[in-house]
Amino acid sequence: MFFRKKEAETAPSAARGAGPAGSVHVSMTVNGKSVSAEIDPRTLLVQYIRENQRLTGTHVGCDTSQCGACVVHVDGRAVKSCTVLAATCDGAKITTIEGLAADGKLHPMQEAFREHHGLQCGFCTPGMIMAAVDIVNRKGGNVDEATIRHELEGNICRCTGYHNIVAAIRAGAAAMGSMRQAAE
Ligand code: FES
Ligand code: FES
């Protein structure tokens, strides 16, 4: 998983509270839509997504880069959005869990989580699914169980025990692989 931890770590410690010292203008594409805003330069990407864009499917579980509930894609790569300053994403293409479904149909990875009961409370699920899609994009549709478990080390689930999550990702990976082959 791709981290931009340094930017967030070097942000002022008052990143979530104090008034802005001067706003910055950011423009990005979020789920295919061009958006722009004047923001406090200390705004984290996850704050921008949830509070400015009102896309609350991206969750905050820890705020310390541990749990993976906040994973989104930045220019096609999975990123923990609690570790990234929104200002560093100026010009980027962001995809959140709300941007995966298309034409009224769930993304194959979403469908696989539903089919294989890859969730209980669902809190970790948006981050799990965004991470899973990234795994398949990098490792392919035949990704094996050991690789999935290794790749998921940055995503924590407190409910399911991971067995069904891994089964869902294997099924979702196969479905994504079949779709890509059919499109070639
Ligand atoms: Fe970002 Fe937990 S909220 S890793
Ligand atoms: Fe509840 Fe993962 S389904 S934390």
Image (tube, rainbow, N blue to C red):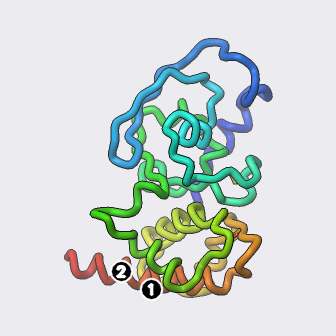
Kindly indicate the quadrant of the structure image that contains residue 101. Answer: bottom left
Specify the farthest residue to the left: 184
Kindly indicate the quadrant of the structure image that contains residue 20. Answer: top right
Decide: few, some or many residues near mark 2? Use Cα within 10 Å; few <14, some 14-19, many ≥20: some
Q: Nearer the viewer, residue 122 or 69?
A: 122
Instruction: Tell me the amino acid under the disc marked 1.
Output: Asn
Residue drawn at point x = 74 percent, y = 47 percent: 63
Residue drawn at point x = 60 percent, y = 47 percent: 81
The answer to whether residue 66 is left or right of residue 42 is: right
Circle on res. 164: none
- Residue 42: image x %, image y %? 65, 27
- Residue 70: image x %, image y %? 62, 53
Return the residue at label 2. Answer: 177
Q: Nearer the viewer, residue 51 or 15?
A: 51
For the C terminus, the image quarter is bottom left
Labelled pair 2, 1 in contact (Cβ < 8 Å): yes
Specify the farthest residue to the top: 22
Q: Nearer the viewer, residue 122 or 107?
A: 122
Instruction: Identify whether 148 is placed above or below 43.
Output: below
The answer to whether residue 108 is left or right of residue 168 is: left
Residue drawn at point x = 66 percent, y = 44 percent: 83
Total of numbered circles in the picture? Answer: 2
Circle on res. 142: 1
The mark nearer the N terminus, 2 or 1, is 1
Residue drawn at point x = 22 percent, y = 81 percent: 182
> Regarding mark 1 in the picture, which secondary structure is present there?
loop
- Residue 5: image x %, image y %? 67, 45
Instruction: Identify whether 182 is placed above or below 19.
Output: below
- Residue 6: image x %, image y %? 68, 40
For the N terminus, the image quarter is bottom right
